[in-house]
Amino acid sequence: MNGAGDHAGRAFLGTLLVVTFLMNMIARGVTETFAVFLLPVQQGLGVSRPEITLTYSVFMLAYGAFAPLAGQLIDRFGARIAYGFGLASLGCGYLLAGSATELWHYLFAAGFLGGLGSASLGMIAASALLSRWFTDRIGTIMSVPYAAIGAGMLILPPLTQLMLASTDWRVAHRLLGAGVLLMLPLIMLAPLRRMTAGSLAWQKLRRQPTTAAAGPWTVGTAVRTSAFWGLFAAYLFTSAAAYSVLPHSVAYLIEAGFNPLLAASAFGLTGMLSVFGILAIGWLSDRFGRLYTASWSYLSTVVGIVALMLVSVWPSLVLVYAFVWFFGLMQGARGPIIIALVARLFPGGGVGTIYGTLSLSMGLGAGLGSWSSGLLYEMTGSYMASFALAAAAALAGLSIFWGVRSLREERVGGARTGLSQLPALVRKEHR
């Protein structure tokens, strides 16, 4: 390819990264505003803490249940349909949430429709598209759109808190919904057809026959391996740990005596740090291996959770900053590792569907974590038991990486087990 062609190719790949980053930022940034909306919506609808936290559980369960279909959507119909459906679902959901008068209205609008939209816009689509164009440094590449989670948390929750200072929660929901819908005609201008087509090398791989010994992986072959179920369990425990804490953190800090804007800003700051943490983890996992990088990230998360627990005993900004640093820096950091492992262990045309199926566990873990955290708060009057459960879940996720052979053997960019050997190692498990 000549110089102009090289430049055009790099520009296209840059556009692809920007699009996947932007869509994931919208998918998660909008829905993470729930942490800011929790108290005003609870008061506005006159419901209990466990009842309002059902919203986040419904959102994550809808995300998880729809995730395999979202994978099919991107793999079979392409980015135009997946992104179009996602923006329409999420935007309409938040518009309708502003008109909720009963709890079930809000559960359906912000929870169910938000889950469908987020599943279609987020990392399921990004993993399918990026794996079609990139093979080298896959952990680093996948970390770019995954870092959008942190960018969304940095921008949208504090912005929502500022809106709530001058208007009510209903108007704030409608403004968010309208902003999402305005993105729909803009994203359709991107070269989505070409993004969906994939590189020539990927197209060749996809045309190969699918067998147990060669060819691209499918969900049917992947689910017969311990690697798939190891990743499933890791995602389950990781999301349970994160979402036993995140949706409740703003309310927890406010009830501990901190200013609401400071609490929302601390939440947003965890998002900002997660951008750097996710990018760093993606690079470190390519350089030093997924196992050791994941281990370090889990331990950092546990330290952050313990610092947050201590805030209830000693409400100090030092502990808040410790939570923001240790928890926030590693928030979402396991995501690029898991997606990179999916792309490496199960290469071919079904990455989106396989990762979407794995995302069932993310939705289940997050839904159970968020709801059980609210329930334990109602039962005990504090979040200590909830956050202790989160720390235990993080340690369980860490144990999965050490306990499953195919995850443990994938060390340093395939140095321990060669890139071409890893899928063969996994295939042996179901022959």
Image (cartoon, rainbow, N blue to C red):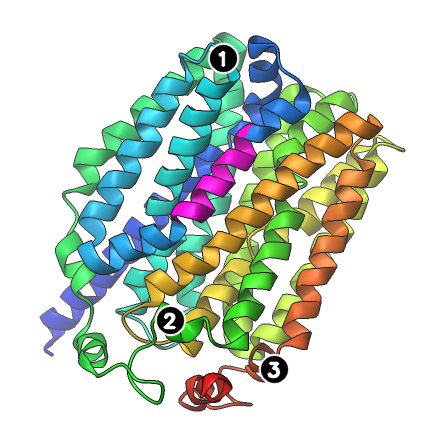
Seen as rendered, the residue at the extreme right is 313
Residue 345 location (% of width, % of height)? 44, 78
Q: Nearer the viewer, mark 3 or mark 2?
A: 2
Q: Residue at x 51, y 34 (%)?
A: 58
Residue contact between numbered discs 1 and 2, judged by CB atoms under 8 Å:
no
The answer to whether 417 is drawn above or below residue 8 in the figure is: below
Question: In this rendering, would 243 be left or right of 31?
Answer: right
SS at mark 1 in the image: loop
Q: Which residue is mark 1?
A: 102
Magenta residues span 55-66
Q: Residue at x 43, y 47 (%)?
A: 65
Q: Residue at x 59, y 49 (%)?
A: 365
Question: Could you tell me the amino acid type at mark 3?
Answer: Arg
Between discs 3 and 1, the one toward the N terminus: 1
Between discs 1 and 2, the one toward the N terminus: 1
SS at mark 2 in the image: helix
Q: Which residue is mark 2?
A: 220
Estimate the spatial distance between the alpha carbons at disc 3 and disc 2, rounded to whole Å. 21 Å
Question: Could you tell me the amino acid type at mark 2?
Answer: Gly
Quadrant of the image containing the C terminus = bottom left
Question: Could you tell me the amino acid type at mark 1?
Answer: Glu
Q: Residues within 10 Å of mark 2 (few under 14, many from 20)?
A: few
Res 133 visible:
yes
The answer to whether 252 is drawn above or below residue 1 in the figure is: above
Residue nearest the viewer, comparing 118 with 354 = 354
Residue nearest the viewer, comparing 312 with 284 = 312
Question: In this rendering, would 346 be left or right of 259?
Answer: left
Q: Residue at x 48, y 25 (%)?
A: 107
Q: Please say whether residue 151 is one of the residues in the magenta stretch.
A: no
Q: Nearer the viewer, mark 1 or mark 2?
A: 2
What is the total number of numbered labels drawn onto the structure image? 3
Residue 405 image label? 3
